[in-house]
């Protein structure tokens, strides 16, 4: 799998964030089989920044090529508004591939609960 999918995200501070990605195989144009893979994802102010926010990343349906990223409301509350970058990497058998990347726009909310 050589192609990297680009998808930009919007995260609202103080809100729970969840995004589902459906990965397809570039060879067969069908769902990418993610059995045996692990997934990780982070967002940073820029790619070389030393501090990062980890997404909770999971593969709930490996046969369907589904990856889910989540941030709890407590996590998004601590984010500063602005633009960030993120990516999603999958690993199997010591081989790591970046499958999704893009920008994250963090928007500050007005209402406080």
Image: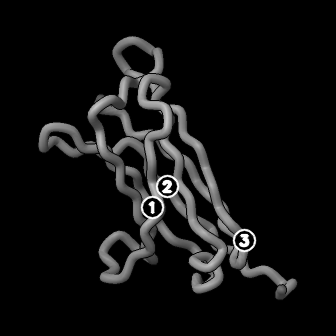
* Picture quadrant where residue 26 is located: top left
Residue 47 percent across, percent down from the top left: 35, 69
Who is closer to the viewer here, 95 or 103?
95
Q: CA distance from mark 1 to mark 2?
A: 6 Å
Q: Is residue 75 above or below residue 67?
A: below
Q: Choose the circle earlier in sequence order: 3 or 2.
A: 3
Q: Nearer the viewer, mark 3 or mark 1?
A: 3
Relative to 28, residue 18 above or below: below
Q: Is disc 3 in contact with disc 1, using a CB cutoff of under 8 Å?
A: no
Q: Residues within 10 Å of mark 2 (few under 14, many from 20)?
A: some
**Residue drawn at (59%, 43%), measured in percent from left and top?**
20
In this view, the residue farthest toward the left is 94
Q: What label sits on residue 86 in the rendered view?
A: 1
Comparing 104 with 69, the one in front is: 69
Q: Position of residue 22 (x, y in %)?
A: 53, 33
Alpha carbon separation for disc pair 3 and 2 = 20 Å
Q: Residues within 10 Å of mark 1 (few under 14, many from 20)?
A: many
Depth check: 64 or 8 in front? 64
Residue 53, image x, y percentages = 44, 74
Crowd band around label 3 with a 10 angstrom C-alpha radius: few (<14), some (14–19), many (20+): some
Q: Secondary structure at mark 2?
A: strand
Q: Earlier in the sequence, mark 3 or mark 1?
A: 3
Camera-near label (3 vs 2) is: 3
| Labels 1 & 2 near each other (Cβ < 8 A) | yes
Give the CA distance from mark 3 to mark 1. 18 Å
Task: Return the residue at label 2.
Answer: 102
Mark 3 — residue?
A: 15
* Left or right of 54 in this view: 17: right
Which image quarter holds the N terminus?
top left
Q: Residue at x 42, y 68 (%)?
A: 54
Q: Residue at x 83, y 86 (%)?
A: 113
């Amino acid at each position: 799998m050589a192609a990297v999918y680009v998808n930009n995200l919007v995260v609202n501070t103080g809100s729970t964030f969840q995004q589902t990605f459906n990965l397809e195989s570039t060879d067969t144009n069908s769902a990418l089989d993610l059995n045996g893979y692990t997934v990780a994802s982070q967002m940073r102010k820029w790619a070389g920044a030393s501090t990062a926010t980890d997404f909770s990343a999971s593969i709930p349906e490996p046969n369907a090529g589904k990856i889910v990223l989540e941030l709890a409301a407590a996590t998004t509350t601590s984010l500063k508004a602005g633009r960030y970058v993120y990516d999603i990497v999958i690993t199997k058998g010591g081989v790591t591939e970046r499958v999704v990347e893009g920008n994250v726009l963090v928007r500050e909310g007005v209402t406080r609960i």
